[in-house]
């Protein structure tokens, strides 16, 4: 009887002590994906007190949690993201990346998760009120963005390119450029803390942001889309959106499965 009881206790203890090992093995089996991000795109990506944060960052972490993935962040300039995806240096990129036919030829995109567009930001005493007023003037843009691509095709405008959008804003504030053309939510975010500037005219484009995924891993694209849909259906997407954009509903999209 004592021997049987001793064996039983030993077995039970063995089961108890083995449970954490099973849990640890399950956690270590999660696939780690390297996510590239440009942290000069507030409120989507930014660095605050040494921590990378923003709407896109929180969103990709929420997606990863839904799909059992681990995230390893890699920061780089915006124009380096798609080449890094092509070479396999990163597996995913988040940076308010506009879905375009040209980009879709070399990378995969998730379903759209934010609706945006380009706008014109100027100082409040500026004579610029529309894109027509930019003719004959110098305009600051972020290198490699859709604003850069659009204005480069227009005649009569001198385009100044910067790798950091803050440098473009500073150029305008210092009188070196008449305006900054950039993604509207970022322009609006900048204007909130700089009362001497404002957005003028209508949106110049209608654009959708997508999470860029390497074409080398189509299975990962499915996981990203599945996770994005789950985050949307759970209500977490709406909470994140409200946290970063408040009551502004212009960027909201219905995320499809």
Image: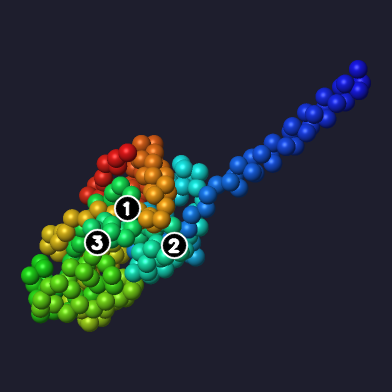
- Check disc 2: other Cα within 10 Å, few if <14, some if 14-19, many if 20+: some
State which tag comes first along the sequence, 1 or 2. Answer: 2
Residue at image location 34% in from the left, 72% down from the top: 164
Q: Which mark is residue 134?
A: none
Quadrant of res 80: bottom left
State which tag comes first along the sequence, 3 or 1. Answer: 3
Residue that mark 2 sits on: 88
Residue that mark 3 sits on: 102
How far across and how far down the image is residue 223, in percent?
A: 42, 44
CB under 8 Å between callouts 1 and 2?
no
Where 24 falls versus 135 (above or below)? Answer: above
Residue at image location 21% in from the left, 58% down from the top: 117
Q: Can residue 246 be seen in this view?
A: no
Task: Indicate the colouring scheme.
Answer: rainbow
Residue that mark 1 sits on: 109
**Relative horizontal placement of residue 176, taking residue 61 as reference (left or right):** left
């Amino acid at each position: 009887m004592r021997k049987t009881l001793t064996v039983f206790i030993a077995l039970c203890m063995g089961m108890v002590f083995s449970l954490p090992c099973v849990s640890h093995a399950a956690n270590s089996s999660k696939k780690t994906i390297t996510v590239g991000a440009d942290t000069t795109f507030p409120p989507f990506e930014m660095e605050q007190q040494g921590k990378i944060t923003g709407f896109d960052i929180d969103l990709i972490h929420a997606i990863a949690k839904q799909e059992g993935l681990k995230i390893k962040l890699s920061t780089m300039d915006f124009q380096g993201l798609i080449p890094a995806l092509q070479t396999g240096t990163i597996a995913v990129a988040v940076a308010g990346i506009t879905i375009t036919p040209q980009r879709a030829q070399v990378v995969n995109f998730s379903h759209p998760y934010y609706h945006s567009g380009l706008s014109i930001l100027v100082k409040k005493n500026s004579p610029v009120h529309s894109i027509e007023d930019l003719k004959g003037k110098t305009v600051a843009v972020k290198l490699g963005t859709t604003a850069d691509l659009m204005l480069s095709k227009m005649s009569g405008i001198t385009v100044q390119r910067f790798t950091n959008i803050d440098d473009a804003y500073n150029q305008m504030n210092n009188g070196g450029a008449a305006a900054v053309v950039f993604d509207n939510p970022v322009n609006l975010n900048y204007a909130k803390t700089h009362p001497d500037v404002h957005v003028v005219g209508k949106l110049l484009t209608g654009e959708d942001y997508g999470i860029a995924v390497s074409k080398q891993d189509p299975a990962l694209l499915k996981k990203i889309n599945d996770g994005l849909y789950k985050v949307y259906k759970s209500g977490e997407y709406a909470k994140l959106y409200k946290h970063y954009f408040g009551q502004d509903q212009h960027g909201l999209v219905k995320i499809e499965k």
